[in-house]
Image: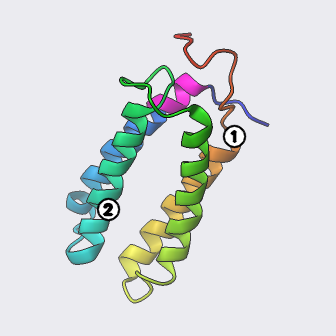
Amino acid sequence: MKFISPKIHGIIDILVCVFLLASPVIFGFTGKLALFTYALGAAHLLLTVFTDFAMGAVKLIPVSIHELVEFVVAVAVIMLAYTLFNNNADGKLFYVIFGNCLLLTWLVTDYRGDSVHSLS
């Protein structure tokens, strides 16, 4: 069941960006874990700002591409949890949980919505 509209998804995206950019400080991440988390937060912010939906400011990226990128990133960060961060318990746990939350959000979002430009 897809019950999250593109507008609500955009709000969630902004909150995810804030969460990712604050996570290294909140959780005490250092080194490559902190750097990767900051980079992912910045990349997610760019994706959100440039997507053609209510929360996008520039509207260059079609929602269908946004949808695909989020799916790929969700799967990728879960895989990275077991490879790149396998020896870092904090990083592994963070990215397993984050990846699954991202995947769940992807599953329940109606990316096509009634109107991707709708403000309601």
Residue 8 is covered by the magenta coloring? yes
Q: Mark 2 belongs to which amino acid?
A: Thr
Residue designated by label 2: 37
Instruction: Determine the residue positioned at 56% across, 54% down.
Output: 101
Q: In the picture provided, is 45 more to the left or to the right than 86?
A: left
Residue designated by label 1: 108
**Where is residue 54 shown, x and y percent of the image?**
48, 19
Instruction: Determine the residue positioned at 69% across, 27% down.
Output: 112
The boundaries of the magenta stretch are 6-11
Q: In which quarter of the image is residue 45?
A: top left
* Whether residue 8 is situated above or below residue 75 in the rendered picture: above
> Dot 1: few (<14), some (14–19), or many (≥20) neighbours within 10 Å?
some
Instruction: Determine the residue positioned at 57% across, 11% down.
Output: 118
Q: Mark 1 belongs to which amino acid?
A: Val
User: How far apart are the two marked residues, 2 and 1, measured between alpha carbons?
Assistant: 24 Å
**Where is residue 29 shown, x and y percent of the image?**
24, 70
> Dot 2: few (<14), some (14–19), or many (≥20) neighbours within 10 Å?
many
Quadrant holding the N terminus: top right
